[in-house]
């Protein structure tokens, strides 16, 4: 069995890694065809997406020496580690790999400069460099060029199909009840990492064990999803009625806006009490084939602002618990205004833009945000009965669970 079978999903990335692996493993065949073999691969992406697992699978298929630079060891002198690893790889006299995990963690210009020097010094040797990093923008451009990191592979959050495959992989290691619906769990966890999905399955098993059962049920999985998404322990008491109402209204705003704009897209909404009062979540499962459409991005902005809008409409109050929603909305609108030039080219901000242009861009973002907020308020006002019903249902459901 190929080591790459240990990676769930990501078929396109696995295919690319296997292709590069074949070029390195059978270099004579490709040299006769005039192929210039790559010197390095950089895997980029957020933590928990499986970059290290992919690198380990690449190494696991290797039959030649591998030298790993472990930056996590206490007292590690990274520069010394890099120099020693490359020296050993060069001395090996074979097709050696140097592997650097978490390349951009606490790295500075001196670390990158030494890495460049070592890679260049091994240019005539059979030394291949494999590295993983969170963000390629943290890596100097001089490393992202042919002869150094020839290939930069971006690892993104798994697709729905990949999420289902990952969940099925981990659930196959457990006993599951017949009611388990993997697609529903994948919808709830849309946009989360493979590590998060593994944690959900493990947490669900804990819930089952706590209930003296040896099988995982759908409710165990849903509880595990909610626990991970809230990222804080649930409080034992029910909290204040007014706080529950405020959070229920806020989440109802998200639900109504999402469902009116795209029927059937809400995967789950929940309200719970914790140490600082009440909090809520609303997860939306969407068709990712439409993810690049402007209408999709605008709907996401309106949905993000709908919690704040609901608080103003229903309670006549300024919602001061919507900082995360606002941050998400502002990032999306900034992307529309600047990166995508959705409202004209005059506000595109380059590396040497003037302060006047930056101010103009910020003003346009604020204007667009105000427009989207008014749209959210109008949408909720037109669907007030729906908003009130969802608010009531969220609060009542919380009280039922609390018993």
Image (spheres, rainbow, N blue to C red):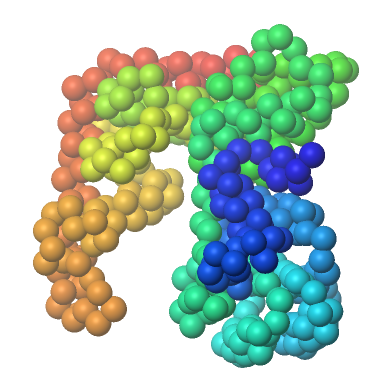
Q: Residue at x 65, y 34 (%)?
A: 166
Q: Is residue 34 above or below residue 317?
A: below
Is 247 placed left or right of 83 in the picture? Answer: left
| Image x and y of residue 373, in percent | 22, 42
Q: Is residue 176 above or below residue 128?
A: above
Judge whether 167 appears above or below 64 on screen: above
Q: Quadrant of residue 69?
A: bottom right
| Residue 16 appears anywhere in the view | yes
Q: Nearer the viewer, residue 9 or 233?
A: 9
Give the camera-side residue of 170 and 370. 170
The residue shown at (16%, 66%) is 347
**Position in image of residue 187 (x %, y %):** 51, 28
- Locate the N terminus and report the quarter of the image it occupies: top right
Residue found at the far front of this picture? 32
Q: Quadrant of residue 124?
A: bottom right
Determine the residue positioned at 27% across, 61% down: 339
Q: Quadrant of the C terminus?
A: top right
Q: Is residue 362 left or right of residue 231?
A: left
Number of residue marks? 0
Residue at the far top in the pictured view: 178
Image coordinates for residue 200, horizontal then vertical, percent: 69, 34
Where residue 282 sits in the image (x, y, percent)?
Answer: 46, 32
* Point 39% across, 24% down: residue: 265
Q: Which is nearer the eye, 261 or 2?
A: 2
**Residue 138 can be seen in this image:** no
């Amino acid at each position: 069995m190929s080591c790459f079978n240990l990676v769930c999903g990501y078929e396109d990335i696995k295919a690319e890694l296997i292709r590069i692996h074949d070029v390195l493993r059978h270099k004579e065949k490709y040299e006769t065809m005039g192929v210039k073999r790559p010197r390095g691969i950089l895997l980029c992406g957020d933590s928990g997406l499986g970059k290290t697992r992919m690198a380990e699978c690449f190494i696991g298929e290797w039959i030649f020496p591998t030298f790993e630079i472990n930056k996590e060891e206490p007292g590690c002198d990274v520069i010394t580690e890099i120099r020693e690893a490359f020296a050993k790889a060069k001395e090996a006299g074979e097709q050696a790999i140097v592997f650097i995990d978490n390349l951009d963690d606490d790295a500075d210009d001196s670390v990158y400069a030494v890495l460049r020097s070592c890679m260049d010094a091994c240019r005539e040797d059979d030394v291949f460099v494999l590295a993983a990093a969170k963000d390629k923008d943290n890596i100097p451009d001089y490393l992202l060029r042919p002869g150094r990191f020839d290939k930069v592979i971006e690892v993104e959050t798994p697709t729905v199909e990949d999420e289902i495959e990952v969940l099925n992989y981990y659930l196959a290691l457990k006993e599951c009840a017949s009611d388990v619906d993997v697609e529903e769990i994948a919808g709830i966890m849309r946009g989360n990492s493979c590590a998060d999905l593994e944690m959900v399955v493990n947490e669900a098993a804990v819930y089952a064990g706590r209930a003296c059962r040896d099988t995982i049920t759908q409710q165990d999985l849903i509880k595990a999803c909610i626990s991970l998404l809230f990222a804080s322990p649930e409080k034992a008491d029910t909290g204040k009625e007014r706080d529950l109402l405020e959070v229920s209204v806020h989440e109802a705003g998200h639900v109504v806006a999402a469902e009116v704009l795209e029927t059937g897209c809400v995967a789950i909404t929940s309200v719970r009490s914790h140490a600082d009062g009440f909090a809520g979540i609303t997860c939306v499962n969407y068709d990712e084939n439409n993810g690049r459409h402007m209408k999709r991005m605008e709907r996401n902005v309106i949905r993000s602002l709908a919690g704040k809008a609901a608080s103003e409409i229903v309670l006549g109050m300024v919602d001061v618990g919507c900082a995360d929603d606002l941050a998400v909305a502002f990032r999306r609108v900034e992307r529309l205004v600047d990166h995508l030039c959705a409202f004209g080219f005059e506000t595109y901000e380059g590396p040497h833009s003037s302060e006047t242009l930056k101010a103009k861009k910020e003003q346009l973002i604020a204007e667009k945000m105000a427009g989207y907020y008014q749209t959210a308020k109008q949408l909720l006002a037109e669907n007030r009965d729906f908003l009130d019903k969802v608010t009531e249902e969220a609060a009542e459901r919380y009280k039922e669970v609390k018993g």
